[in-house]
Image: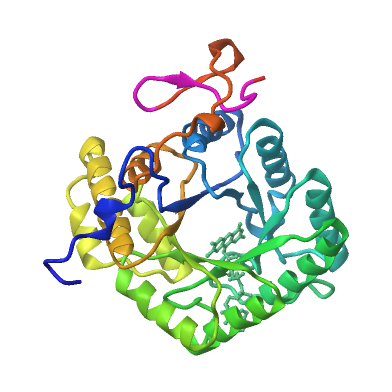
Amino acid sequence: MDAGAPRASRFVRASADAPCAIRVSFEFFPPKTAEMEQALWEAIARLAPLSPNFVSVTYGAGGSTRERTHATVERILAETMLTPAAHLTCVAAARAEIDAVIAAYAQAGVRHIVALRGDPPGGAGERYTPHPGGYRNAADLVAGIKRCGEQCGGLEVSVAAYPEKHPDSPSIAADIDMLKAKVDAGARRAITQFFFDNNLYFRYLDRVRARGIDIPIVPGILPVQNFKATRNFAARCGASVPAWLAERFEHLDDDAATRKLIAAAVAAEQVLDLVDRGVRDFHFYTMNRADLVYAICHLLGLRPHQDQISVRDEALGALPLPGGERVGVRGLGR
Ligand SMILES: Cc1cc2nc3c(=O)[nH]c(=O)nc-3n(C[C@H](O)[C@H](O)[C@H](O)COP(=O)(O)OP(=O)(O)OC[C@H]3O[C@@H](n4cnc5c(N)ncnc54)[C@H](O)[C@@H]3O)c2cc1C
């Protein structure tokens, strides 16, 4: 970037009335306990007024959260104005079982599915063997979802993409061939695995475009809520953690307040650089926590929208929003 040129990230929202140029989506995971359920809905209540493009709900390893994912997506549909996207994997299920899950989503009013192969039941790193009567990989699943969607007027499908290549993939070229197969099967958006070095994303984007793939490749942003957990998770899914990032969290094990400030600064630096280099869509891995994501979205020019806030009655389960205001998302807590 020309050092003298104005930074695009300073102008994402030119005035209070101008619409924000940035679009975001938020990823949540289905809660296991009542306490986690409460945390999830606090996060949704805080983030919903930012009018995300969609919110997605993950599908547990081995299909372990099938019911909980469905229940969470249904509750989002019933109690908020958000557009949910349900994650779905091929793991440990026959085609007919997966088709039944897709049909149940369609029946409930879901129109967007994030199609994934999933990891082997023993975890990432083990050899993946498709279910004998199941979908072989994500491209096969995309085709199945598109077929099932014909009954309900169509289903939008997003898929995963890997700027540092998927660990199972022999090469980045083979990995991009797989992305091409997913697009050819009907995927209309790819969401990337998280990364911390933006150059990796742009190098990947160049290769994807050179392969003739023109769908949006939305960067997946992981605010570092917990550095050690992030490093372990990154090692399992083939994402690199640069030395500079480790250094930023050094000597802060007993200092949660500073860790949080550093996490916000790291994520802000990353997303503002992406904006300066032309990115306008972001997918946030929220880990069911709103505060860092809310702050980053605020930096990106997003402000709460009144039409996402329809209940202002504490008795109806209003939850605290940043700034001490208490609002409820439609019907929350009914
Ligand atoms: C945005 C996002 C959301 C996710 N959500 C979930 C979720 O909700 N639940 C969940 O369980 N997991 C989730 N994952 C993780 C994902 O399931 C794993 O990364 C999985 O291992 C691959 O799934 P995929 O859809 O990318 O697979 P695919 O696109 O089918 O394959 C990924 C890559 O692996 C290579 N590959 C696949 N099979 C083989 C093979 N047999 N031999 C050689 N190479 C092979 C291909 O080159 C391909 O590029 C998510 C990942 C991302 C990035």
Spot occupied by residue 98 in the image (x, y as percentages of width and height): 80, 61
**Viewer-proximal residue among 240 and 3:** 3
**Residue 118: percent from left, percent from top:** 64, 66
Q: In the rendered image, which quarter is residue 182 located in?
A: bottom right
User: Horizontal and vertical percent for residue 288?
Assistant: 50, 41
The span shown in magenta is 322-333
Q: Main secondary structure of the magenta part?
A: loop
Question: Residue drawn at (61%, 77%), measured in percent from left and top?
Answer: 127
In the rendered image, the vertical position of residue 13 relative to residue 185, given as above or below: above
* Residue 51 falls left or right of residue 87: left
Q: Position of residue 237 (x, y in %)?
A: 47, 67
In the image, 322 versus 196, the foreground residue is 322
Q: Residue at x 37, y 28 (%)?
A: 322
Question: Relative to 297, does residue 91 appear above or below in the rendering?
Answer: below
Examine the structure image and report whether residue 72 is included in the region drawn in magenta: no
Rendered image coloring scheme: rainbow
Q: Is residue 252 visible?
A: yes
- Residue 303, by quadrant, is top left
